[in-house]
């Protein structure tokens, strides 16, 4: 270790350093997108009447519980995260936050978010969020080390926030449209995860995570897992238009964006290499925000 390293390590940690460690525990990138998904569900569920105050409460409650859930996943995986290049510098494996504090922080956020949603939004929205947390932490998280099928389970909590948002606006989970929107995010996640799993496969293998299909030396199964949900995205996107929930602006923008996403899937299917997997991964990062923007613009002009 150089002298500079030693000096940096022994420098006293400021309040800002500590706050940024706790913020990092909440996986801000994913959590931000989760809250955006919830807001899209809320807007689409607000056809009978829109309440700005209710939207603010749903945002704060979802942000709290989603942050706590993400932080608790980091608490549960603090050991294995230390074995992967991508995650070894996270606050828990890097010992910048103790396991005890990680546990208290994450549970505090989960409980605060849950109570907030039940009291200030509605019971159904709280229940959907609780189900999201339970499936993510107690089904998906342990399954990551058992089978690559984990992706089909993990995509459920990943897609439920739109249902939670819609339920926040309506108080029910029995509306056809919310489940089509759920299907859209569900199908988006499979190529999102498969592309990441391909790019990071050495890291995942080293930590014992089973993220790619078994016995797939040529990558054919991975290609099918990517292409089938990608193709299902087209009728799913179209269905929201057919149901007259959204209009032509959404339809045209989303179909073009989906075709672009599928194009990256086809390129990966043909080459099955790291550069095309990386492009597919980046396409997956931008796909959902673009779809949300088209839904939002369409909702504004309807
Ligand atoms: C089984 C489901 C999922 C898995 C395994 C997964 C995994 C990951 C991983 C490992 C990364 C980091 C990639 C890198 O190192 O560059 C990532 C990035 C990202 N994911 Fe996912 N993800 C899933 C679902 C979701 C969901 C539901 C959302 C939001 C609705 C989401 C939003 C994002 C975003 C915005 C990024 C880029 C920014 C960041 O790294 O924080 N993901 N995902
Ligand atoms: C409303 C509410 C409770 C929302 C929670 C939503 C939530 C946190 C969804 C997570 C989606 C998901 C499976 C991410 C990947 O985690 P990972 O463990 O594979 O990621 P990692 O390898 O980066 O830790």
Image (cartoon, rainbow, N blue to C red):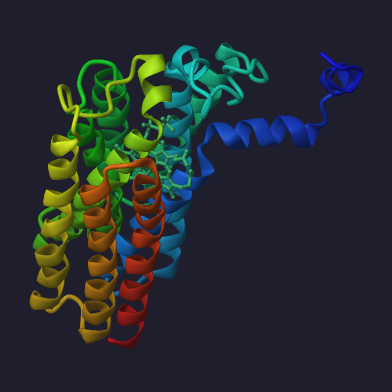
Q: Quadrant of the N terminus?
A: top right
Specify the quarter for ligand 2.
top left
Where 242 sits versus 292, above or below? below
Q: Residue at coordinates 49% horizontally, 15% vertically from top-left? A: 83
Near-viewer residue (112 or 23): 23
Where 46 sits versus 70, above or below? below
Near-viewer residue (26 or 235): 235
Where 153 sits versus 255, above or below? above
Is residue 157 visible in the rendered image? The answer is yes
Q: Residue at coordinates 36% horizontally, 82% vertically from top-left? A: 300
Q: Residue at coordinates 29% horizontally, 58% vertically from top-left? A: 264
Marks counted in the figure total 0
Residue 8 point in image, percent of width and height: 85, 24
For residue 225, side relative to residue 264 (left or right): left
Is residue 123 visible in the rendered image? The answer is no
Q: Quadrant of the C terminus?
A: bottom left
Residue 282 point in image, percent of width and height: 41, 53
For residue 253, side relative to residue 203 (left or right): left
Residue 142 point in image, percent of width and height: 28, 18
The quarter holding residue 21 reads: top right
Residue 19 point in image, percent of width and height: 70, 34
Near-viewer residue (89 or 163): 89
């Amino acid at each position: 270790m150089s002298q500079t390293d030693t000096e940096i390590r022994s420098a006293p940690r400021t309040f800002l350093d500590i706050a940024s460690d706790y913020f990092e525990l909440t996986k801000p990138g994913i959590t931000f997108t989760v809250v955006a998904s919830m807001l899209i569900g809320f807007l689409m569920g607000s056809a009978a009447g829109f309440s700005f105050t209710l939207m603010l409460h749903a945002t704060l409650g979802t942000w709290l519980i989603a942050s706590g859930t993400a932080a608790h996943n980091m608490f549960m995986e603090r050991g294995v995260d230390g074995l992967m290049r991508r995650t070894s510098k996270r606050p828990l494996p890097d010992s910048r936050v103790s396991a005890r504090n990680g546990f208290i922080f994450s549970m505090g956020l989960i409980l605060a978010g849950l109570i907030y949603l039940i009291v200030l939004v509605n019971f159904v929205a709280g229940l959907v969020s609780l189900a999201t947390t339970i499936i993510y932490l107690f089904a998906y998280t342990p399954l990551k080390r058992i089978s690559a099928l984990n992706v089909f389970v993990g995509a459920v909590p990943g897609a439920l926030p739109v249902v939670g948002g819609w339920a926040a606006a309506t108080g029910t989970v029995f509306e056809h449209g919310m489940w089509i929107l759920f299907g859209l995010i569900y199908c988006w996640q499979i190529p999102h995860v498969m592309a990441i799993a391909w790019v990071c496969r050495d890291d995942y293998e080293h930590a014992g995570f089973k993220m790619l299909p078994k016995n797939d030396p040529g990558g054919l199964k991975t290609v099918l897992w990517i292409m089938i949900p990608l193709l299902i995205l087209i009728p799913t996107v179209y269905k929201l238009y057919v149901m007259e929930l959204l209009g032509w602006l959404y339809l045209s923008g989303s179909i073009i964006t989906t075709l672009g996403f599928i194009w990256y899937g086809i390129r990966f299917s043909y080459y099955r290499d790291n550069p095309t997997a990386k492009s597919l991964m980046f396409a997956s990062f931008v796909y959902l925000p673009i779809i949300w923007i088209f839904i939002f613009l369409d909702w504004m002009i309807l």
